[in-house]
Structures are given as C-alpha cells and as structure tokens.
Amino acid sequence: MVLLSLFALGILVIDLMLPKEWKQVNALTAMTGLVFSAAAVGKLHFAYRAAEQRGAVVEALSGFMGALVVDRFAIYFFYLFLIGAAIAILMSMRYLEIEQENHGEFYALLLFSVVGMMCMAAGYDIVLLFIGLELMAISTYVLVGFLRRDKRSNEAALKYLLLGAFSSGLFAYGLSLFYGITGSTNLGFIAHGLANIIAKRPHDPVVAFALLTTTVGLLFKIAAVPFHQWAPDAYEGAPTSVTGFMSVAVKAAGWALLLRIFLFGLGPLRSMYVPLLIIVSIVTMTVGNLAAISQNNTKRLLAYSSIAHVGYMLLGLVASDGVNHSTGIMAIMIYLLVYTFMNLGAFAVITSLRRRSIIGDDIDDIAGLYSKAPVEALLMFAFLLSLAGIPPLAGFWGKYFIFLSLIQTGHYALAALAVLYAVIALYYYMQIGSAMLIRPVTDTEPVSVGPAMRLALAVTAAGTILIGIFPNYFINMVDWSLGIVGSPHSAMLMR
C-alpha cells in the first residue's frame, strides 16, 4: 500500500514535467508500481508458504494496533486487485489517447483506488475499513467522470457520487451503531459483543437496525438489487477501461469488505441476515437477467449481467458460514477470480473498438466484427461463453461451486432457480455473439489494436482458458487463502 501511494504521488509530480508526446510514461510508471507491489505481496505469500512447510504456526501479520491484518484472505484479494489494475492500465493507454484525456491523474487515481481496496481487504477495524472504502470510492467517482467533454460521463459520475454518498452514510451509521452496542471498533471484539447480546436478547431491535443499515451499504457497493441503480449508468458513461476496472476490481473490493464484515464481525447475526440475503439474491438474479435481455448497449448489457452475477455469488454466502460449510465462500472467491479475467477481456474487446468516429459500445458497432477482426471476435465469443458458465472455460467453475454449495446445504430450490437463470443469461450473451459472427458489417473502418491492448487480451484469454482447463492449482490457492487444509475441493475433482 505504501509503495502504491508513493508511485501514485510520483506520477502526479512526473506528469507536470512530461511533454504531451511522452504521456505514456505515466502508464509505465503505474505498471512499475504494480509490479513492485506484487513483488511485496509475493514475498509475504512465500513467507507464509515457507513457514507452513516447516510446520510452524503462522500468525497473521497485523499493524496499527490490530486495525490492519494481512492474512491469507487479504493476500488473495491483493493479487486480484493488482491483476485487475494492471489489465485496466493496458486497456487505457491507447484509449485515453483517442479520447485526448491522457493525463497522469488517471493512473494516480487508479493506484489510489487500489490502496483503498487493500485497506478494505486487510482491515480488521471498522474505522480503517470505512477509510479504505471512501478512498476507493472517491477515486472511482473521478475516474467515472474522467471524460470531461462527454456529457454521459459527467452525468454518470454525478449519479454515482450522489448514490454512493447516500449509501456510505447508511453504512457509516450502521457501523457506528455496532460500535455503540459493543464498545469496540475491532471486528473480533464486535463479534464477541454481539454473541453476548444475542444470547440475552435474541431479537434486539437496535442490533437488527444496525445490521439492516450496514447491509444496505454493503449491498450498494456490490450493486445488488434494489441498490443497483447506479451500475448501468456508471458503466455506460465511464471510460470503457474504467468500466472494466469497476466491474472486477471495485466489485471484488466490495466483496472483500462484505465477507470480512459478515464472516469476521457479524457471524453471530447469521440467522438474521441469511433470510434477507436469500430474498436479495433471488431478486438480483431476476432483475439482472431479465433487464439484460432488452439492452442494445453492450456496456449496459454487461452491467446488468454483472448484477446477475452478484445474485449468484450471494447464494454462495447463503450456503456457507465459513466454518461448518466453506464451499460457498470458496465458490465466491473462485467466481471473483474467473470474473476478473473474462469480464475484463470482454471490456477489452469493446475498448478496442473505440476509434475517432466510433464509440464502439452499441451492439451495432460490434456487428460483423468477425469479418474485420476475427481474433478479437473469437476472443469475445470465448469470454461470453465463459460468462454464461459453459465448460471448459473458467466461468463454469464459478457457477459449478455455487451450485455445489447449494446442493450440499439442501438449498435445492435455489440451485434449480440459479440454473434456470444461467440458461436465460446464455440467450442475451449470444445476442452479442450473433451480432459479431452473423450480422453484416455496419461500418468499414478497420479495427486497430495496439500492443498494450493485445497484451491485455492475451492475458485475459489465457486466464479464461487456463483456469477452465486446469482448475486444480487455482482451487488450491483459494483453499489456502481460506485456511482449508488438504485442498478437498481439488481432490474431489481428481476422483
């Protein structure tokens, strides 16, 4: 986090001295910062591994009097944030040149948002968690409105800001109530205090109201229905590379925060929030999938698709408490990993369609893409199939483990409903596929893909295909991050 902050500040200083034709140095500086940060995270990761191989009892690294805890859970999310940011930078380099908005502030804000995400994943104190959330959110508000001459971008940023501020207020109010009830801002002490209160007063109204306001704030951050209104407008109006970044890294940070609070702080209230999550997950899948069918804008379609995916992941939380049943939590983390590659890949293809005279985010703009750019069209088709959960691509494993967790815990009706909505999702994904492969070309201007975008497409395609074909290594990694010994999920697949 310190390294990323230093590089972000360095970009702001360097940008003042760079001539216009050298602005790509800002992107290279940001990538260098991500590489150094990844090396630091990798060092922590291998230190954990080495200690475990020696048979030592590994304690989580903590700082700031226990407010920050770098455990295996946090390390996993650190990797996701860094991968998402790196691919977003590769997608942005040529895109910002075309939009004539190639400023150093863009990359600095991207790095600052990742710093906030890391605080959200590693925070063990509600004050630090809220600070990390706001650092990420404020940076993202500016990134959404970064196209200053685009009215859609300005409008999206304003809507996102207003709704985000309202949800942050509710979230902060809920956290303050938990502090007042338990007398602590530490998640561990909050969990202990809530257990004592529930043992004496199982239906305490103050606890219920605190849980409701906190849950509303968290559901807004992951764009669950009915707190999803900001997502389609923000996705459509934001720069396309920022839309891709928001759809994976920002959402992963929201899930890291939600899991950290629900599993580590509000565990004693599970019987109270699970019925609410069941209702929200069903409504989220319903609204996301049905609304996506009627969309003609690819960014809005993928926005509603993203909302539907949130519904699937909420089912994983319903089916797992992280203690007696862990498959659902593991499924969420696998889902976030594969979603990072396949969704960023889809947005990378949409970003590559941006030319001087063509915005590239309508389905008509992607019509006949196979005849102009066959590689990009085939990659987009693969990303769409993965989003639909078709094997042997990576997206299959996310849905598979969600369904498995529901069956293991006896939620058969929810599993059947989730399968039904997966079939509906395949229909609207194939609308894009049909436009690319069957419909005639609507414009003859060639698609030019720069080296940075080619690298982004290669990385996302490799992740989508390799995770799908060789899932065991990635499942082992998720099991390790959750402290599951022996990787039972990987062993199950090898039978």
Image (tube, rainbow, N blue to C red):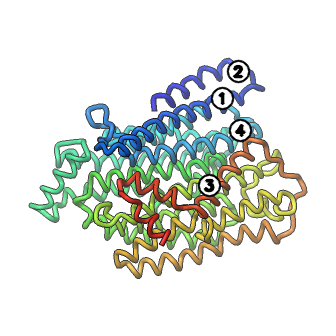
Q: Are marks 2 and 1 in contact (CB under 8 Å)?
A: yes
Q: Secondary structure at mark 1?
A: helix
Residue drawn at the location 47% of the way across and 67% of the way down: 311
Q: In the drawing, what numbered circle is on residue 26?
A: 1
Residue type for callout 2 = Leu
The reply, left or right, for residue 378 in relation to residue 295 is right
**Between marks 2 and 4, how big is the CA–CA gap?**
16 Å
Q: Tell me the residue that label 3 is attached to.
A: 463
Tell which circle, 2 or 3, labels the residue nearer the N-terminal end.
2
- Find residue 435 and report its horizontal and vertical position in percent: 77, 68
Number of the front mark, 1 or 3: 3
Q: Which mark is residue 355?
A: none
Mark 2 or mark 4: whose residue is earlier in sequence: 2
The local secondary structure at tag 3 comes to helix
What's the residue at 55%, 35% (across, down)? 109
Disc 3 to disc 4, C-alpha distance? 21 Å
Q: Seen from this angle, which residue lies furthest left?
A: 200
Amino acid marked by disc 1: Asn
Using the numbered discs, state the Cα–Cα distance from disc 2 to disc 3 in whole angstroms. Answer: 35 Å
Q: Nearer the viewer, mark 3 or mark 4?
A: 3
Give the CA distance from mark 1 to mark 3.
26 Å
Q: Which residue is mark 2?
A: 18
From the viewer's perspective, tell me whether residue 359 is left or right of residue 262: right
Give the residue pinned by disc 4.
93
Give coordinates of residue 461: x percent, y percent. Answer: 67, 55
Circles 3 and 4, Cβ within 8 Å, touching? The answer is no
